[in-house]
Amino acid sequence: MDAQAALGELMELSAQVDRAAILDEGDVVLASSEEQPAAADSLARAALELLAAAADVRPGGPAVTRLEVALPEGSVFVVREGASTVVAATVPEPTSGLVLYDLRTCARRIEEEPPPRPARRRRARATEDAGA
């Protein structure tokens, strides 16, 4: 599934997510719910800064793959799954486990191969009788 379709699915299914963006392995924004590119870049930059700050807490430890920052006005979640990073800003007091599940599912959907297209059926051509 492409990133824009995965993001659309996330925004449709997760009522707790207000804004979201998907970044590729080079940290470039692939898709965003933000209409303005500057807002999408700001959301992406916040995600990258949060991941870097979390990594500084445990230098030399395993890579940070999930994080949540809870604020009174809403939370910010970041999930790294495969080659994708998904960041989301939520409503106040979200159900953290559900939001993390939704973001991981979104990232995994990007990694999925599209289902194979069914083979086209060809109509059997009517053959003419040899004697007619």
Image (cartoon, helix red, strand yellow):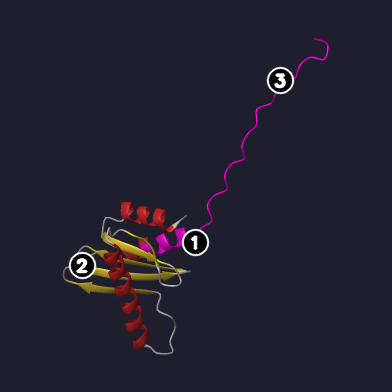
For marks 3 and 1 on the same chain, the one whose residue lies earlier in the sequence: 1
Circle 2 residues within 10 Å: few <14, some 14–19, many ≥20: some
- Please name the residue that numbered disc 1 is placed on: 111
Distance of label 2 from label 1 (alpha carbons):
28 Å
Query: In this rendering, is residue 9 above or below 129?
Result: below
Residue 22 included in the magenta stretch of the image: no
For marks 2 and 1 on the same chain, the one whose residue lies earlier in the sequence: 2
Q: Which residue shows up at 57% across the image and 44% down it?
A: 117
Q: Nearer the viewer, mark 3 or mark 1?
A: 3
Q: Amino acid at mark 1?
A: Glu
| Quarter placement of the C terminus | top right
Distance of label 3 from label 1 (alpha carbons):
45 Å
Q: Which residue shows up at 31% across the image and 55% down it?
A: 11
Q: Residue furthest front?
A: 37
- Please name the residue that numbered disc 3 is placed on: 126
Circle 3 residues within 10 Å: few <14, some 14–19, many ≥20: few
- Residue 74 disc label: 2
Segment tinted magenta in the rendering: 103-132
Residue 111 included in the magenta stretch of the image: yes
Circle 1 residues within 10 Å: few <14, some 14–19, many ≥20: some
